[in-house]
Image: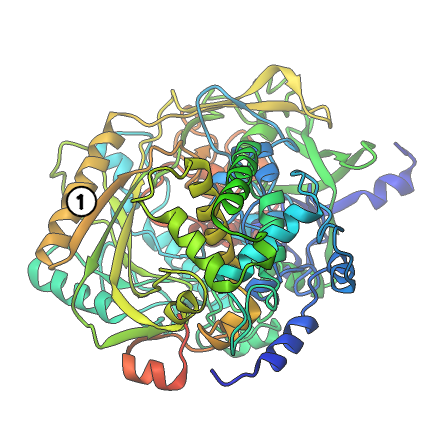
Amino acid sequence: MNITRREALRNCLIISIGAALIPSCVQDKNKPLLALKHIELDGNQQKLIADLSETIIPATDTPGAKDTYTHLFVLKMLDDCSTKEQQDDFKKGMKEFESLVKKKLDKPFAESNQQQRQELLSSILDNKNKDVPEDAVNFVKTMKKLTLQGYTTSKYYLTNVKIYKLVPGKFSGCIPVTTFDKKGGSI
Amino acid sequence: MGNNNDSIKNRTFDAIVIGSGMSGGWAAKELTEKGFKTLVLERGRDVKHLVDYPTTNMNPWEFEHRNQLTAEIIKDNPVISKCYAFREDATHFFVKDKEHPYVQEKPFDWIRGYQVGGKSIMWARQTQRWSDFDFEGPARDGFAVDWPVRYKDIAPWYSYVEKFAGISGNKDGLPNLPDGEFLPPLELSCVEDYFKGFISKNYNDRHVIYGRCAHLTQPQPIHLEQGRTQCQNRSLCQRGCPFGGYYNSNSTTIPWAAKTGNMTLQPFAVVHSIIYDEKAGKATGVQVVDTNTKDVTEYYAKIIFVNAGALNTNLLLLNSTSNRFPNGLGNDSGVLGKYVAFHNYSARISATYEGFKDKTTDGRRPTSAYIPRFRNVFKQETDFLRGYAAGFSASRSVNTNSDGFGPELKKNLAQKEWGPWHVGSHMMGETIPKESNYVSLDKTKKDDWDIPLLNISIDYDDNDAKMKKDFLEQFTEMYIKAGFTDIKTTDTKQAPGLDIHEMGGVRMGNDPKTSMLNKWNQMHACKNVFVTDGAYMTSTSTQNPSLTYMAMTARAVDYAVNAMKKGEI
């Protein structure tokens, strides 16, 4: 990947993603990141969602969930694109997840390190762990699904990892895979 | 309503065109080019080419919901949400369920676009000519009534509209799918090309051809003059195209008509009814409701073209009653609103192909390959009437490994692993127009503009079921023989309407006792009214219908203008 994290971050900031997001940069710990219309999630719950997104796709030498605003996308989708039933299930699952955090981590989720967080998520999705409530499993699955959806449709991803061209120009019906890879084709 | 002479004069035109979509745009262009002062009435808002395409240059990440519909929109719009093109990037071009209700006596997904350009903004842009195997269908197979036209009558008009609209395709020399005035075709993918070769080697009666579509693959001077340019293969057509790369009324016919100085385009004007003058024995104008103020105004003209969109044209004529025509304008035969048909799109098949592992496609393509109807073309050979065409497309996927969490997951996502080729087809079946498939005016319910709601009573029949079974069997066989694997068939069970190819109700025919329109799309019983949208279709065949609407519209205008000059209208 030929883009530095700093550059990616700057690119992301340039994207107009709505004035509603600006205050979230200004910091106020318990203040919600987004004003939601259809699901109630307080500042702490929103922060947990953001931290979970960042755990799933952390910033490394390339941008992570927060750098690509994926955490805000997750909130937006929970708010607007989930049915009441899905929202209720999600919140139930979140509660179960929080009690698992208490049980399995010696610190709050926010203060645990990436390794501890990842292990928790993996153990929840591990079929062998029969004692994990189904709601918690679905909660983690939903978080992963939305985070992946947000990250893989983010500007960073579609301009650096899997190239999206708004104006492809030519369509080629049959080219060698090697040519495609070399010139960075799009599908 | 002002009734002084000046006011009447201001409201009098040579021609009125009701609707500005696929066919209305053509009526407007042809009439104004021939010097007719023409009033074009559009029930929706104006949509100006380039100006009113708000999402056209947006990247995927710029959509709040990444092009997904919100739960609220889906809940409020059970019908329109089923439409494949109704996504975050184009919701503004579709009629929402609650805005314009209708009555489903039987389930029918009525997909509409009320704006200048109508559905020509969001259409699927596939354009094939009819042949005599289509026009002669009803007469040969004994359904509906004989078409009063044949291919030779329409062929020059196909050429005429194709040159202006810009149609890409390949000259395939098939008698059942005549060649047109083609711009170069869009490439087939490796697997489509393989299947094309395989089918031609193994079947005498079947062909896989390049999709024929309304895209400027090589713009000609006439297209540049329209202000349009080369299609860039964005495949974002439903948003409106900044290049004018595909044909819609907004980029092509409407501005062309405007340029003549002869067009008055009036948006927010829904036609309540056509006014019939018993003494004169013809229509004199239309009664229009301003959709915002609800003011009612009459406009007058010597000829009227009805292009409201197939079912709305039925609605309008049914609502245009007089002493002479108590059951709807021109409806001496009693067939108005009946014999409505559509295309059966309710089955799909998909599979994978393991070959061509070293090849892929690059970019997007606004069409697919096409398999013209091969059943019952030259003679009756199955236990059902008529047949189906099908799309065929093959493209390669990239498998994304989304295992794990954290850095490992990121690494997995960044790795590209080429998956197999995915192939797929969907059926486009002809349905048989029947008296029992009809639309009518609701006796009690009216809309906000005092116009009765439309009752829709349209259903599949046994012939459709047999044809669907045959499609799935034949395609399964072809797919297996071609070496495709993991074959999956789907009966979508979708209601009629979602094909967005509703046709008929105001059918053409030779006999005024059994049809509404003569061979010029002219009402048998009211000679200065012409119907040239999908309502005129006597039968549906399998082709995407818009090209035929365009051709017949240009032909009807030509006839109407000549007939007026000769004093026949």
| Residue drawn where x is 73% and y is 51% of the image | B265
- Label 1 CA crowd tier, 10 Å (few <14, some 14–19, many 20+): many
Instruction: Tally the marks.
Output: 1
| Residue drawn where x is 37% and y is 40% of the image | B148
Q: Amino acid at mark 1?
A: Arg
| Residue drawn where x is 63% and y is 31% of the image | B100
Residue identifier under label 1: B375
Front-most of B95 and B120? Answer: B95
Quick check: can you spot residue B248?
no
| Residue drawn where x is 44% and y is 47% of the image | A141
- Left or right: residue B452 compared with residue B238: right
- Left or right: residue B77 compared with residue B364: right
- Left or right: residue B427 compared with residue B251: left
* Quadrant holding the C terminus of chain B: top right
Front-most of B138 and B238? Answer: B238
Callout 1: SS: loop
Residue B361 location, quadrant: bottom left
- Where does residue A185 sit, x and y in percent of width and height? 40, 78
Residue B214 location, quadrant: bottom left
- Where does residue B556 sit, x and y in percent of width and height? 51, 49
Front-most of B502 and B536? Answer: B502
In this view, which residue lies farthest toward the top? Answer: B444
Relative height, residue B3 to residue B159 (above, below): above
Relative height, residue B56 to residue B293 (above, below): below
Relative height, residue B246 to residue B294 (above, below): below
